[in-house]
Image: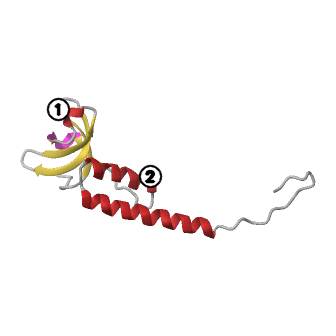
Amino acid sequence: MKFEISDWVHAKTRNGELVHGFVDTLDEEQRMANVFVVKSDNDESIGKSIQVREQWVRKLPIYAWDDAEAIQSLIDIALATKDDQWFEELSLKLQSLTKAERSNQKKLVPGPSYTNRLRYKV
């Protein structure tokens, strides 16, 4: 199989639903994956584990840890899955990232401004 347990994936179910979640179990013999659904176009599937054929599953790219927006999206997923430990870890990462961004902004010193002959600042 091309997936491992805990991989984030998006998939299409046999009923045509589009789901987003993570792999919680694998059946290599039947080439099926159980996906815990975090988001779906069918609200009834959210929070449930569904079985999906391997060929209908696509692995999601790994998020960059230096992007505040990506971390906020992961925090939303941690809240949806009620994963307190992951939520705390992501919150600390976001907090340290925003502190680093603020300190970088303080280091930026504006250059000298000059007035051209039309009295516009350059």
Q: Which residues are magenta?
A: 50-56
Identify the residue position indicated by label 2 in the image.
Answer: 69
Q: Residue at the spot x=45%, y=57% of the render?
A: 67
Q: Residue at the spot x=19%, y=50% of the render?
A: 23
Q: Is residue 97 visible?
A: yes
- Checking the image for residue 121, the label placed there is none
With respect to residue 10, does 62 lie above or below?
below
Extreme-right residue of the structure: 117
Which quadrant would the C terminus be assigned to in this image? bottom right
Identify the residue position indicated by label 1 in the image.
Answer: 14
Front residue of this view, candidates 114 and 11: 114
Circle 2: residue type: Glu
Pointer 2 or 1: first along the chain: 1
Q: Percent from the top left, x then y, of residue 27?
A: 9, 49
Q: Percent from the top left, x then y, of residue 29?
A: 6, 48
Circle 1: residue type: Arg
Front residue of this view, candidates 36 and 75: 75
Q: Percent from the top left, x then y, of residue 111?
A: 75, 66
| Residue 51 painted magenta | yes
